[in-house]
Amino acid sequence: MTQSNPTRSLITLPKELLLHISTFLPSTADLNALCKTSTILHTLLQRPLYRLNACQDSSALHWAAKHNQISTARLALSAGADPQALTDSDPHIKGCTPLLLAAYHGSEAVLSLLLEIDDINFNPNARDRKYIRPLISWAVKQGHGGIVRALLRDERVDVNLQDKNGDAALLIAANTSNWALVSLLVGSGRADPRVTNRQGATALSRASVDRSAEGDVELLFAAHLRLILDEDGSEAHVQHVFFYAAIMGQVEVVRYLVNSFGEILDPNGGRNGYGRGAFSIAAHREQVDVVRFLLKWEKTDPNLRDGWQHQTPLFVAVKEGRVSVVDVLMDSERVDLELADVHGTTPLNEAATTRENGDVIKRLVTGSRRTDPNARDQNGETALFKAASMGILENVNALLEAEGIDPTLGNLEGKTPMNIAMDHGFTLIANRLADA
């Protein structure tokens, strides 16, 4: 006995009756299941399916936005899908419009289609519910350059909207080290580089701690300088740009700002109270050209000590073995070569305890300006004593070349450098000192 095919029997019914039957199916899933039974039913019931979906949750449009399915998106919109409908279907972000989903997933075709919607109520700046982050910021965070370009062409998009952390698109691009997008955003003229997040960070401050940004910061500085000239020459803004230009080695920017706004600038970090201003940090970062320029500016205090260990820029440069900075600082008559830290340790004494620091020691004890090779710390220890006690022969040899050095000076206990070397079993050093 031949069994009848229910689907074949169904499609023999008049189209009007089939359409009427479809209205009794309560959900999109039910109607979709019916559509899948045959090509004829799919063709006939496709529009009713999309209309039903539009009436329920517009999930078809959300799916199309996520997967960049332009034909599905067009069908959904033509059937009345709500372009503002929210969904929690994505596992990563919640409360998303179709446009936000398209931006997040890099669906350029669907995003362009949605941006064509001419409706006063359509919001191209929609944010998700968890991070309160607008779609252009999501596009930047996900690295979708094409999406960012499309959004920048739409004048309705607010490039400077901030998320719950205060991060805007430009700062997010800097946070993710996407300097191509930083250049794109700044080059558009629409991203404000002054926008700060809740921690006070800007794109410029983020760039200052990212070595990969060194070749891509010119546009950022140019944007800031344009703002300074055109509308915002406030003390806070100018100081912000000056500080980061100094520590990032942008000497031409520093020179321009000092010459034009020197009366409102502070190179010494007086406002933060830590003794770590533009000059000190530029020296720490070995920005030699900036250090050399700022040394000539009368407002710069080259002997400013930090608030913790009371170390001067020279002390820090010596400790870190930055010979080029030591050289520039020692050439300046304004720099005190003997200022000690909180423990009474001078720069030379500090250099003596650092291995592979012979070149720095030689620079400190030779030349037209040089340190006192016999200076003692609070324990009465000279640099030579410290080098001998640490067993650093290179430093001992460098110190013994110093004019006027006394290798017999002992500490408060009366021990000489040779005594301490022998105590520690540093025979080579003891013999070298005995021959001095």
Image (tube, rainbow, N blue to C red):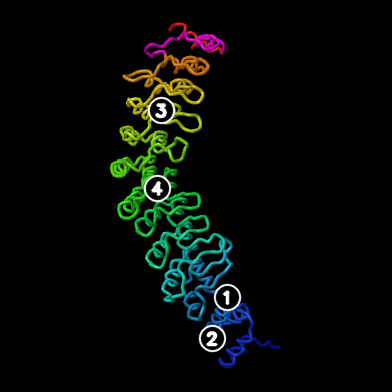
Q: Position of residue 406 (x, y in %)?
A: 43, 9
Give amino acid for label 4: Ala
Q: Position of residue 23 (x, y in %)?
A: 61, 87
The reply to whether dot 1 and dot 2 touch (C-beta < 8 Å) is: no
Q: Quadrant of residue 41?
A: bottom right
Label 3 CA crowd tier, 10 Å (few <14, some 14–19, many 20+): many
Please state which of residues 297 and 69 is positioned toward the viewer in this rendering: 297
Give amino acid for label 3: Leu
Magenta stretch contains residue 416: yes
Return the disc, 2 or 4, that comes first in the chain's sequence: 2
Q: CA distance from mark 4 to mark 1?
A: 49 Å
Q: CA distance from mark 3 to mark 4?
A: 28 Å
Magenta range is 400-423
Q: Nearer the viewer, mark 3 or mark 4?
A: 4
Return the disc, 4 or 1, that comes first in the chain's sequence: 1
Residue 44, numbered label: 2
Q: Position of residue 264 (x, y in %)?
A: 35, 43
The residue wearing badge 4 is 236
Q: CA distance from mark 1 to mark 3?
A: 67 Å
Return the disc, 3 or 4, that comes first in the chain's sequence: 4
Whether residue 356 is visible: no
Q: Position of residue 352 (x, y in %)?
A: 46, 20
Against 366, is 36 above or below?
below
Residue 57, numbered label: 1
Q: CA distance from mark 1 to mark 2?
A: 22 Å
Q: Is residue 136 left or right of residue 20?
A: left
Give amino acid for label 1: Asp
Q: Is residue 236 left or right of residue 427?
A: left
Q: Nearer the viewer, mark 3 or mark 2?
A: 3
